[in-house]
Image: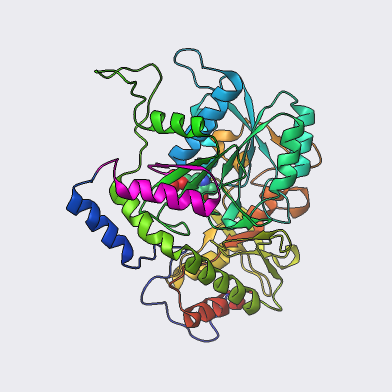
Amino acid sequence: MFVNKSNFKPFEKKIWLSSPTMHGDEQKWVNDAFEKNWITTAGENINEVEKLVAEYAGVKYAVALSCGTASLHLATKLAGERLYGQPKPNCGTLQGHKVFCSDMTFDATVNPVAYEDGEAIFIDTERDTWNMCPDALEKAFELYPDVKLVVVAHLYGVPGKIDAIRRICDRHGALIVEDAAESFGATYKGRETGCFGDYSAISFNGNKIITGSSGGMFLTNNIDDADKVRKWSTQSREAAPWYQHEEIGYNYRMSNIIAGVVRGQMNYIDEHIAQKKTIYERYKEGFKGLPVSMNPFDAVDSVPNYWLSCMLIDKEAMCRQVRGERETIYISEHGKTCPTEILETLIKFNTEGRPIWKPMHMQPIYRMNGFVTAKGNGRGQSNAYIDHGDVLDVGADIFRRGLCLPSDNKMTPEQQDIIIELIRNCFE
Ligand SMILES: *Cc1c(COP(=O)(O)O)cnc(C)c1O
């Protein structure tokens, strides 16, 4: 139950979950594009950021696109074509095929499967990193042995168990589309996320670790794949005197202006990660003694980029909270709290938190799709409306008890201490 013991007042300037942090270099490269009149989807900034990002991520090729979603779309489409050949006219490359997908993620990870007429089967989450559970993936291959594609995301900047997932995929002859939109700069066993997929995607959306205002990239080690995506992204024009189209095209290329912003930001990615790490550790320290834990990661094999700090409330410390499709209520209780109460408290003090990304298998658009847990069961035992922790799958449980904390790298230590105190006061 929230008790304003310290009589805090709302922050005058809103504290965001994660907002763009500009440094000035970005403006220089944007101006450069203006001065040279390379304003559209070709130019030096694009070439340069493709080079910089490929080097940073440790992949051979990067193709700059309009957003992370476009990168995931073309990665998924390409995987379908490589696996199943050219689609029938007017059909997506995954038509008639199932695809295993991360369940607790942003919907942009998995929507491209639907764009390409495939059917997503969601794989439950594991507790160690809040990412795709390798045991559940293994179970899914038992249930659906014909599946040849796995779409896997690294949530909140924490690398998933990508080695185990890769081993399972190799054993079943499946390709991987890796969604590193949130995890650019995070490493697993010393290698950057974004290098583990057959095709990988990153994002420069405004709230990500670095931003281009928008933008994204497709990453691969195969030159034919990079060329194919570049061609698709520029309307699939063939080498002919007129507009000749032998494949469906897209207008997905990054503009040279946006590339200028990304170019400037690339100098600061490591600084941003260091700031986010400090924020994560300050929360961790500040919550000592509370019945909560921070979003976990594998400290031996991985280094997160700490994009968002999240917390999970212990089962015993949860007050009653019921979530419908669009609304939520809770009953305040002495000594207990819930994500809804904390988020409402943060809003009152002009601070932005957010619920954990609602798992895909709980989303109305995907409620008819398959869902596999580590126990091999799926549909039926999970329900967004029921609120007794033990029967929930892992994803639904983390959604119920977890929340994303204000993680803006411009938040001062003093402001963060007040936020910590506000959250502590919810447990009164
Ligand atoms: C942001 C995000 C995307 C989409 O990136 P955009 O650049 O916004 O299109 C995809 N997947 C995940 C996990 C994301 O967080």
Farthest residue, direction bottom: 6
Toward which corner of the image does residue 428 lie, by quadrant? bottom right
Start-end of magenta stretch = 40-67
Q: How is the image coloured?
A: rainbow
Which residue is painted at 68% across and 30% down in the image? 174
Query: 122 and 82: which one is in front?
Result: 82
Which residue is painted at 64% across and 74% down in the image? 284
Magenta-span inclusion, residue 295:
no
Toward which corner of the image does residue 79 lie, by quadrant? top right
In this rendering, the answer to whether 194 lies above or below 337 is: above
Give coordinates of residue 373: x percent, y percent: 75, 41
In this rendering, the answer to whether 207 lies above or below 143 is: below
Magenta-span inclusion, residue 56:
yes
Query: 212 and 381: which one is in front?
Result: 212
Which residue is painted at 44% across and 53% down in the image? 52
Question: Quick check: 44 left or right of 276?
Answer: left
Give coordinates of residue 214: x percent, y percent: 37, 50
Q: Looking at the image, how many numbered discs can be counted on the residues?
A: 0
In this rendering, the answer to whether 182 lies above or below 219 is: below
Query: 48 and 258: which one is in front?
Result: 48
Question: Quick check: 48 left or right of 119?
Answer: left
